[in-house]
Amino acid sequence: MDLAELTTLRLGGPARAVIDATDEVTLLGAVRVADEAGDPLLVVGGGSNLVVADEGVDGTVVRVLTSGLRVESDACSGVSVTVQAGEPWDAFVAHSVDQGWVGVEALSGIPGAVGATPIQNVGAYGQDVAQTIASVRTWDRHDRTVRTFANAQCDFSYRHSRFKAAPQRYVVLDVTFQLAPGDLGAPVAYAELARALDVEVGERAPLRAVRDAVLALRRGKGMVLDVDDHDTWSAGSFFTNPMLDPAAAAALPEGAPRFEQPDGSVKTSAAWLIQRAGFERGHGTGRAALSDKHVLALTNRGGATTRELLDLAREIRDGVQRDFGVTLVPEPVLVGCRL
């Protein structure tokens, strides 16, 4: 099987073996067998954050397809819900909104599986999963044991975690979220979303309205999967927003976005830098191009190769470096290839 069939970019060559793990026993068994044999292993969830080489993977691919959730409710602490790693993320968000569980509504429309969300500390529109994750249960491939990490042990930061720092060590088995009951979403923390909801930043809006607004915003940027829309044949935002020291942030041109962070760093906008470096929506050579809707998404227009996509990514990275002295960092995981 070509991994192009398992990724939202629809790119990637063949794997030697693909195992569908629909339960935890099968998942752990496949990982153990590969590790004991010294066989290269790639664990795949929704495939929405992967860029796989055209040559594919000379090893075993395990698809995490575990499903189900377990709910515990406490009047003081809210709702505790444990979700299997293979559950589709947006299905969990939709269920949370239907149940009146507050805390993940602004993360609507994000593709992929629940198990991937703590690895990248997935976030959008002023929310990230670190705000609601209580614990992450994993298989530690080094110690060959099940290990559970409380939120404070996950080392969450912007698009980062202890799991991303050691990408070959942990296989996420399930994630426990702590959500508040209510009809209103969490205080809106993102100006674009606040405008769409006709509220001020810091105010709240009905859960359903927040989800609907986020889905509309994401569709407008080609960030909700649609097989007929090549703008969604992507890995989402390809570059993270740069985190700069104060001196580097001060050196940016007047008008560049600057968001001071609690640790003293300054976040700026990758999209702003890309556009100001001369890369507009649709820029590309044909089969690999920037989205027609959003400059942060690198897309497969049909028939592209991973090499072509990475050539485009290098062009953009180098252009931003040349004009602003800022090195953009890719957000997806690169498998068998590099930028």
Image: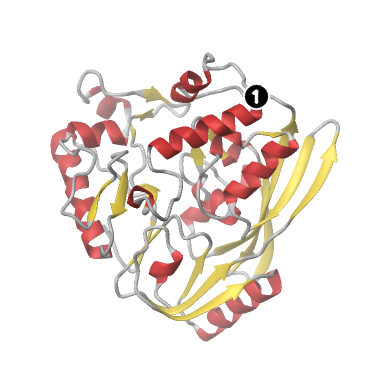
Q: Position of residue 27 (x, y in %)?
A: 63, 72
Taking the spot 30% from the left edge, 36% from the top edge, the residue there is 270
Of all residues, the one furthest to the top in this rendering is 200
Between residue 158 and residue 302, name the one nearer to us.
Answer: 302
Q: Quadrant of the N terminus?
A: bottom left
Q: How far from the left and from the top, in percent, is residue 301? A: 27, 55
| Residue 256 left/right relative to 263 | left
Query: Residue 164: horizontal and vertical position, in percent?
Result: 48, 54
- Please provide percent x and percent y for residue 176: 70, 48
Task: Give the amino acid type for the residue marked by disc 1 in the picture.
Answer: Pro
Of residue 72 and residue 96, the one placed in the foreground of this image is 96
Of 88 and 336, the residue lying toward us: 88
> Does residue 97 appear to the left or right of 280 in the view shown?
right
Residue receiving disc 1:
206
For label 1, the SS is loop
| Relative side of 221 to 324, left or right | right
Tally the marks: 1
Q: Residue at x 21, y 18 (%)?
A: 254
**Residue 75 falls left or right of residue 13:** right
Vertical position of residue 124 compared to residue 112: above or below: above
Placement of the C terminus among the 4 image quadrants = bottom left
Considering every residue shown, the one lying at the far bottom of the view is 37
Give neighbour class at mark 1: few <14, some 14-19, many 20+ (Cα, 10 Å): some
Residue at the extreme front: 228
Check the image and tell me how it is coloured.
secondary structure
